[in-house]
Amino acid sequence: MKLLHKTPKAALYYLFHPGFQTFKERIKDELTSTSGINLDDVVDDSNLYAYYQQGESADFVAACISAASC
């Protein structure tokens, strides 16, 4: 009997990774305070997770998003 089933929904995967959630919150706070950009309107979790896996800093990703150069 399997307790956890693999699902194609990426959102469930990201919810179980608190490091990624912290990374996302830092980016969200930075964008909101500096440029008023809502992170959820601009970038989805799968794109952010790629930066997280590469080890990019939250400050770098926020600056990249606010400059629209990512």
Image (cartoon, rainbow, N blue to C red):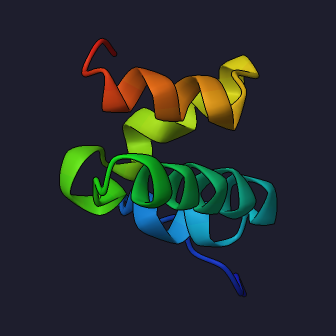
- Could you tell me which residue is drawn at 57 percent across and 74 percent down? 5
- Nearer to me, 46 or 39: 39
Which image quarter is the N terminus in?
Answer: bottom right
Could you say which quadrant of the image residue 32 lies in? bottom left
**Residue 29: quarter of image:** bottom right
Could you tell me which residue is drawn at 30 percent across and 57 percent down?
Answer: 36
Q: In this view, does 51 lie to the left or right of 63?
A: right
In front of the other: 58 or 12: 58
Image coordinates of residue 30 in percent, x first then y, are 55, 51
- Say if 7 sits above or below 62 in the image: below
Residue drawn at x 60%, y 23% is 60
Where residue 53 appears, x then y in whole percent? 69, 28
Q: x%, y% of residue 16? A: 70, 70
Pick out the residue farthest to the top: 69
- Report the number of numbered marks: 0
Q: Nearer the viewer, residue 18 or 61?
A: 61
Please give left or right for residue 23 compared with residue 37 in the image. right
Q: Name the residue rendered at 76%, 22% in the picture.
A: 55
Q: Position of residue 54 (x, y in %)?
A: 69, 18
The C terminus appears in which quarter of the rendering?
Answer: top left
Residue 37 vertical placement versus 49 (above, below)? below
Farthest-out residue, left: 41
Outermost residue toward the front in this view: 34
